[in-house]
Amino acid sequence: MLKIYGQARSRAFRVIWLCNESNIPYEHVPVTINIDKAQCKEDWYVKLNPNARVPTIEDNGFVMWESAAINLYLAEKYDSPLYPRTDEGRGRMLQWAFFVANDIESPMITVFINRNGHPREKCDPVLHEAAERQLSLKLKILERHLSQTAFFGGDQWDMADFMVASVLYLLFVLRYDFSAFPKLGAWLTASVERPAAKEARRLRELL
């Protein structure tokens, strides 16, 4: 059986959500991070993932890390109902997957860290403001797209939408103000209210 290593509060959440959406059986193996003597630093885990980060999967002896790559691999291998059936659909999926990873995740995490991750006295307001500006510019691109079509994947919510939503879930957790991006806010809320997402959220949010 597929094993997913990592705390549900980490990026392992994204893999758990994908498996729920795709009816992929899995065993969740919590691995502690960001604490003294974290399990992700132990030799047995570093042999699986030399970055000592989560998530990592072990799929019938095949070991893989990096959450976006894991989800693209699993969706294709296990014939997820979300996986696009056309070359154009797969192109859209990859476009949005790389966009959120390269352009949105970094400023989003900076906003999160400086709003929630540090004691107030250690927060950097200048860095926070710069990240907020950068994030806003990128969210405008998503809002503009959704003003023209209901989904990122085409005619229905598919793997392209999943890749965007699984990253933007952090903004949902932050209760980010989407008043300037109403279509994006509505789309994200609908995405994280999907039954498979709610199942993964229960595992994450009740910790």
Image: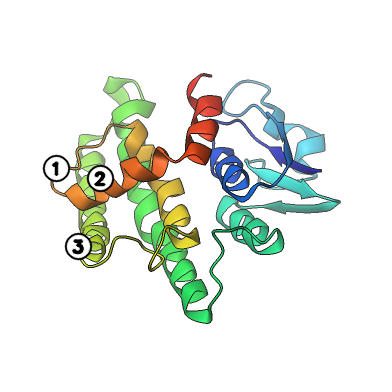
The part of the image, by quadrant, that contains residue 176 is: top left
Element carrying mark 3: loop
Query: Residue 190 location, x and y as percent?
Result: 34, 43
Proximity of marks 1 and 2: CB atoms separated by less than 8 Å? yes
Above or below for 23 versus 199 = below
Q: Is residue 49 visible?
A: no
For label 2, the residue is: 185
The part of the image, by quadrant, that contains residue 80 is: bottom right
**Left or right position of 38 against 198:** right
- The residue furthest bottom is 87
Of label 1 and label 3, which has the lower sequence position? 3
The part of the image, by quadrant, that contains residue 34 is: top right
- The residue furthest left is 180
Instruction: Tell me the tag on residue 179.
Output: 1
For label 3, the residue is: 147
Q: Residue at x 29, y 30 (%)?
A: 115
Q: Nearer the viewer, mark 1 or mark 3?
A: 3
Closer to the camera, 171 or 119?
A: 171
Q: Amino acid at mark 1?
A: Ser
Q: Residue at x 31, y 26 (%)?
A: 122
Query: Residue 194 location, x and y as percent?
Result: 44, 41
Query: Residue 7 location, x and y as percent?
Result: 61, 30
Element carrying mark 2: helix
- How far apart are the alpha carbons under marks 3 and 2? 12 Å
